[in-house]
């Protein structure tokens, strides 16, 4: 997510999980789960039919899937069952995390500075993909991160340079972190190691199913990174753009040389990542299969979490404009669009599951209604992934902060208050919204 800073087996609308499975995804071809999802103009296609999905973000699933002291395979299956029961058919999952001194990053990661790979986490990802396959659910897997909470590009730079800039360092205030991290794109040693990681994962054989990842139809798309920005300061951005574009193009070409079955996506937020420049968004998506938009009204200062009632009208107008502009750009580019991250705080910007979700409900309705209307209009919107799923997890500390060693993983990453944006399994109204959207979106 941006830093700018039941057992519910029956669906809440009264639909069964089985009926939602039939509705979600590819219309009358929903049973064609052995077929790969591909792009055809502004649509995703599976078999002979459009593939539209309602999805969620759950970055932590590989940790749950691992057979370790921090893993919990029982919880993994419960969470996937819950998500499927409310109509979720696609999950965006972190498939790479880099260990380093970068503060507030998850440990353990998938890779360390000396090149050691965490076999248990990779096997945990294998378990996740196998469990998705059992349910006919699909995944978007992203390799790295622009932000600090999984180590990300800053960690890869540290491995090569020995230097770290930490997010929210009072001596190096915003935008020092993303500006410094953008040097990743120009660092040949760092990008070469990234390509090595990509090559490893794309050619991996699932230890549970025996299927190559490149041949797994439950994988919808490989994604280069979570919110890759070409810096933030205009002068930094202008200087790094050639290397940024080169990294995108070379990464996409590498993946396609190894895997002809799956789509490639970038994971970009949209114009918030480019100082409003549409030309950067267009060029960045030239050699990937579809476009993405992430929408964070609180993080971007469009609403005040302590005064949602007083700031909702102005903030929601900016959200509407952002939605419309990215639909327009996707249409002009002739490519599908997914709203793959969108989040909103609970009332009063409280973190406890008992806090009301009045304005969050309004916000989800707004995103979902725009997606549903765009389908009716024959537009490019093909998927929605809310941020994020907390499920049965609960904060382990009174201050709602994650501490190294905690295992109650949530969609709210380690650098954030636990419960800030994620949906809990007790959020009945929010889950009903997702369920209703799954039905409406599939039949729009």
Image (cartoon, rainbow, N blue to C red):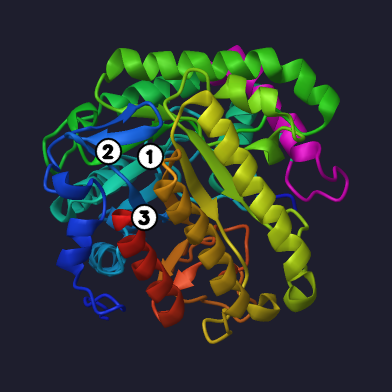
Q: Is residue 264 visible?
A: yes
The segment highlighted magenta reads: 166-192
Judge from the rendering whether residue 336 lies leftward or rightward of residue 257; answer left or right.
Answer: right
Q: Would you say residue 247 sits in the magenta stretch?
A: no
Disc marking residue 141? 1
Residue 182 coordinates in the image, percent (x, y): 69, 27
- Asked if labels 2 and 3 touch by Cβ distance under 8 angstroms, the answer is no
The residue singled out by tag 2 in the image is 219
427 in relation to 404, above or below? below
Q: CA distance from mark 3 to mark 2?
A: 15 Å
Judge from the rendering whether residue 102 lies leftward or rightward of residue 55; answer left or right.
Answer: right
Judge from the rendering whether residue 330 lies leftward or rightward of residue 57; answer left or right.
Answer: right
Viewer-nearest residue: 166 or 112: 166
* Mark closer to the chain start, 3 or 2: 3
Viewer-nearest residue: 435 or 228: 435
- Asked if labels 2 and 1 touch by Cβ distance under 8 angstroms, the answer is yes
Residue 148 coordinates in the image, percent (x, y): 62, 45
Disc marking residue 54? 3
Q: Would you say residue 170 sits in the magenta stretch?
A: yes
Q: Nearer the viewer, mark 3 or mark 2?
A: 3
Viewer-nearest residue: 108 or 369: 369
Disc marking residue 260? none
């Amino acid at each position: 997510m941006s830093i700018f800073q039941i057992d519910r087996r029956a669906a809440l609308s009264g639909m069964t999980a089985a009926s939602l499975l039939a509705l979600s995804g590819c219309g009358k071809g929903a049973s064609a789960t052995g077929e790969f999802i591909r792009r055809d103009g502004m649509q995703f296609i599976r078999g002979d039919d459009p593939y539209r999905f309602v999805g969620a973000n759950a970055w932590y699933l590989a940790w749950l899937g691992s057979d370790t002291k921090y893993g919990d395979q029982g919880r993994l299956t419960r969470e996937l069952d819950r998500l499927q029961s409310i109509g979720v058919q696609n999950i965006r999952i972190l498939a790479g995390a880099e260990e380093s001194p970068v503060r507030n990053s998850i440990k353990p990661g998938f890779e360390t500075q000396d090149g050691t790979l965490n076999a248990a986490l990779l096997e945990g990802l294998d378990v996740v993909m196998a469990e998705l396959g059992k349910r006919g659910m699909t995944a978007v897997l992203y390799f790295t991160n622009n932000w600090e909470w999984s180590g990300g590009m800053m960690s890869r730079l540290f491995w090569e340079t020995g230097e770290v800039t930490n997010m929210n360092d009072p001596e190096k205030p915003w935008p020092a972190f993303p500006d410094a991290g953008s040097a990743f794109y120009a660092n040949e040693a760092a990008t070469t190691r990234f390509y090595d990681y990509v090559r490893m994962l794309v050619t991996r054989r699932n230890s549970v199913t025996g299927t190559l990842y490149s041949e797994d139809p439950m994988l919808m798309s490989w994604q280069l990174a979570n919110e890759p920005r070409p810096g933030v300061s205009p002068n930094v951005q202008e200087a790094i753009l050639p290397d940024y574009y080169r990294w995108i193009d070379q990464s996409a070409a590498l993946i396609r040389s190894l895997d002809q079955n799956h789509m490639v996506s970038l994971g970009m937020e949209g114009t918030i990542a480019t100082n409003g420049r549409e030309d950067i968004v267009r060029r960045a998506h030239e050699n990937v299969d579809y476009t993405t938009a992430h929408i964070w009204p609180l993080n971007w200062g469009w609403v005040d979490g302590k005064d949602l009632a007083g700031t909702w009208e102005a903030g929601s107008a900016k959200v509407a404009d952002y939605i419309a502009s990215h639909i327009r750009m996707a249409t002009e580019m002739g490519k599908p669009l997914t709203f793959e991250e969108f989040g909103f705080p609970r009332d009063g910007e409280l973190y406890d599951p008992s806090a009301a979700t009045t304005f969050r409900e309004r916000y989800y309705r707004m995103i979902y209604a725009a997606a549903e209307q765009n389908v009716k209009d024959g537009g490019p919107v093909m998927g929605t992934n809310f941020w994020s799923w907390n499920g049965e997890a609960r904060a382990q500390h009174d201050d709602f902060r994650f501490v190294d060693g905690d295992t109650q993983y949530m969609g709210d990453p380690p650098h954030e208050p636990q419960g800030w944006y994620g949906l809990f399994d007790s959020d009945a109204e929010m889950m009903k919204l997702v369920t209703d959207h799954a039905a409406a979106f599939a039949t729009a």
